[in-house]
């Protein structure tokens, strides 16, 4: 090296980012609690009372993670009115691809028509969407990416023992997507994230095949440790909890969702803050659950464009992440 290295240009980044469009998809096949009770020792009332699920959607054999991601991603582009040619990066948070290679993102990009995309999967389990949104936003702000498609997509029925009542009643399939792009006013706040790898044994793949979770331990951890992460995300974005219009915790269990909302209300969140309960008809779709809930709520009119949304994901790892976003 001779002399000083050249000053690198960092002028391509955007001052801020926004979510520009949303999309989601679920398989056609509806599975009720009664359907599950016909196969295992459970019942509709127990599932409604203890988990909050009324029904969920299961993919058929020929419907894969990549297929659902393509549908959700294409819908997010259409919602934003953005052509695939104007996207350069695709991130697919998921933990249910059939094998680590190939990843989902490159195939998804190709099928949507995003040519030569920067494309990668991201595994932070049920926190994956918030991790992906944070990375997408920072890639755009640094100048590394222009517009980024983030698609949480999961086929949990591939990794759930259909006869294990502690998991088979909870998990389901689906995909949810957000297109993130540059903006002058901030529409995505900094991500508050972290992990607790010492608690890895609480949720893992038993013999590399089926999900095992220590339900009660995860429940206790989630109901005590997740609300502070959400509060930190609001603080990083410079938002008071009383400014939050909509809370979307990962849809793991309705009782966990309600416990998080209760803690946030005790710290200043409004009583009329809308709280996502999409788990009732979607089940727990891991990294898809937050964008799926947001898209469903917007379609139902419970969330409006411009609303301040606080999203918080948590799950295996253990991993967690939260951020503020403005609903497109
Ligand atoms: O998304 C990734 C993160 N995962 C989570 O956040 C999951 C967190 N955990 C949970 O959501 C809950 O712990 C579960 C839904 C998994 C279980 O609910 P729970 O209220 O913690 O039930 P439990 O394990 O304490 O079991 C209570 C009773 C037991 O019977 P006894 O021993 O009291 O007679 C279980 O055998 O309920 C029984 N039980 C069931 N009964 C009917 C457990 N599962 C079922 C079932 N149907 N499916």
Image (tube, rainbow, N blue to C red):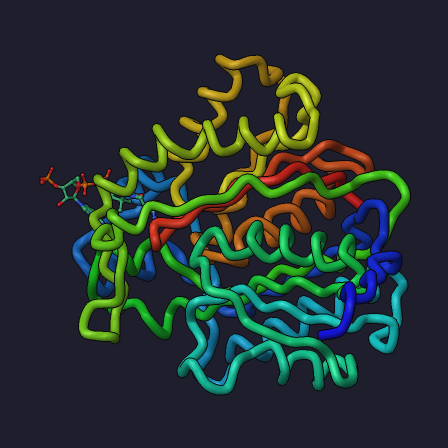
Residue 236, x across and y down, in percent: 63, 31
**For residue 269, which quarter of the picture?**
top right
Count of marks overlaid on the render: 0
Q: Residue at x 72, y 59 (%)?
A: 139
Q: Closest to the observer: 305 or 189?
A: 189
Residue 73, x across and y down, in percent: 70, 68
- Most distant residue in the front direction: 2
Residue 179, x across and y down, in percent: 75, 59
Visible in this render: residue 255? no
**Image height of 68 relative to 10, above or below:** below
Q: Closest to the observer: 93 or 292?
A: 93
Specify whether 211 is left or right of 320. Answer: left
Residue 239, x across and y down, in percent: 69, 24
**Image height of 70 relative to 212, above or below:** below
Ligand 1 found in image quarter:
top left
**Image height of 240 relative to 164, above or below:** above
Specify whether 326 is left or right of 234. Answer: right
Q: Residue at x 42, y 37 (%)?
A: 254
Visible in this render: residue 269? yes
Q: Residue at x 52, y 75 (%)?
A: 65
Quadrant of the image containing the N terminus: bottom right
């Amino acid at each position: 090296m001779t002399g000083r290295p050249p000053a690198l240009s960092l002028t391509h980044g955007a001052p801020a980012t926004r979510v520009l469009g949303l999309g989601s998809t679920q398989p056609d096949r509806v599975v009720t609690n009664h359907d599950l009770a016909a196969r295992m020792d459970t019942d509709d009332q127990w599932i409604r009372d203890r988990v909050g699920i009324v029904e969920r959607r299961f993919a058929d054999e020929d419907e894969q993670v990549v297929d659902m991601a393509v549908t959700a991603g294409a819908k997010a582009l259409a919602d934003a009115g953005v052509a695939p040619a104007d996207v350069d990066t695709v991130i697919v948070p998921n933990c249910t691809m059939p094998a680590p290679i190939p990843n989902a993102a490159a195939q998804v990009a190709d099928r949507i028509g995003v040519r030569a995309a920067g494309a990668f999967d991201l595994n932070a389990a049920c926190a994956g969407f918030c991790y992906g949104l944070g990375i997408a936003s920072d890639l755009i702000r640094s100048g590394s990416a222009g517009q980024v498609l983030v698609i949480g997509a999961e086929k949990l029925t591939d990794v759930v023992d259909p006869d294990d009542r502690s998991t088979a009643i909870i998990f389901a399939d689906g995909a949810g997507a957000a297109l993130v792009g540059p903006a002058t006013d901030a529409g995505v706040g900094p991500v508050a994230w972290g992990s607790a790898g010492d608690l890895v044994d609480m949720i893992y793949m038993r013999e590399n095949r089926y999900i095992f979770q220590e339900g009660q331990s995860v429940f206790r951890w989630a109901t005590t440790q997740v609300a502070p992460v959400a509060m930190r995300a609001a603080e990083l974005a410079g938002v008071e909890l009383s400014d939050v219009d909509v809370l979307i915790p990962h849809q793991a269990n309705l009782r966990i969702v309600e416990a998080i909302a209760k803690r946030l209300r005790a710290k200043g969140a409004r009583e009329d803050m809308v709280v996502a309960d999409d788990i009732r008809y979607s089940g727990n779709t891991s990294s898809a659950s937050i964008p799926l809930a947001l898209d469903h709520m917007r379609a139902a009119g419970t969330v409006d464009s411009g609303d301040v949304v606080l999203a918080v994901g948590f799950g295996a790892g253990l991993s967690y992440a939260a951020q503020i976003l403005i609903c497109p």
